Image (spheres, grey):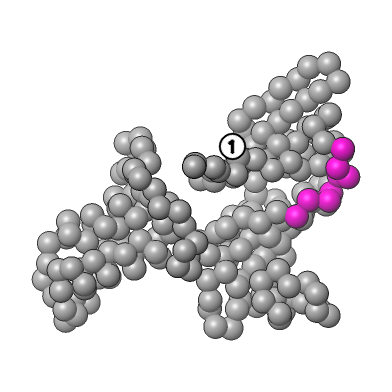
Amino acid sequence: MNIKLEAVIVPVSDVDRAKAFYEKLGFRLDIDIVSENFRGIQFTPPRSETSMIFGKGVTSGRSGSADLVLAVDNVDAAREDLIARGVNVSEVFHYTGGPFNNAVKNPRVSGRDPQGRSYFSFASFEDPDGNRWLLQEITTRLPGREWEQTRARTMDVATLAELLRETSEHHDHYEKTHAEHHWWDWYAPYLSARQNGSSPGDAVAAANRYMDEVLHVPPR
């Protein structure tokens, strides 16, 4: 059975103000429906499959009561991008008791996770209503944390060209540190992983694993 989380509802008090804020974040505006006593707006974060919905007559929830999480490849880069867009973002932090553990006194500790672990470094910001957003850095997914996909996502030429450029940059490091090989053998598993939703770090690991375990390419 194929089930996906399609959207989350975010309570806001001023619809136009919220719309302007999420446009500023770079979220994609999908719909803005207006009818008598109702207005529904849907935004989708960049490259996300889950959207957010808010508006008038959408929910009886108290404005500012939502807690939401955005997964990012690099929390520092994501933070800098939002600041450049005029968003007030916290310094990077980690939780003293582990991710999302607010059950302890002073749960947030300044700075990245000391061990550099995926899932453990954060930054935060709020929208004008006080809805709370966390940026969670996820560089490598733990085993079992991704659904297998039966087919690669379709993409336009410009997106494919950008993906090829990215692949070339990551392959450059591998090429300098390993014995002679065909570049396309490394490109194939990397592109396949990225098209099926893996992060760049996961895709690099997949390509390296293929070259090591299947083609047995030794380091220099």
Q: Is residue 48 above or below residue 199?
A: above
In the rendered image, residue 38, in percent from the top left (x then y), is placed at 81, 23
Within-10-Å neighbours for mark 1: few <14, some 14–19, many 20+: some
Secondary structure beneath disc 1?
Answer: strand
**Label 1 sits on what residue type?**
Arg
Q: Which residue is mark 1?
A: 28
* Image x and y of residue 122, in percent: 64, 67
Q: Residue at x 17, y 59 (%)?
A: 185
Q: Determine the residue positioned at 80% across, 79% down.
A: 104
Residue 14 located within the stretch drawn in magenta: no
Q: In this picture, which residue range is highlighted in magenta?
A: 60-67
- The residue depicted at 12 percent of the width and 67 percent of the height is 181
123 in relation to 11, above or below: below
210 or 80: nearer the eye?
A: 210
Side of 95 relative to 157 (left or right): right
213, 32: nearer the viewer: 213
Residue at the outermost top position: 36
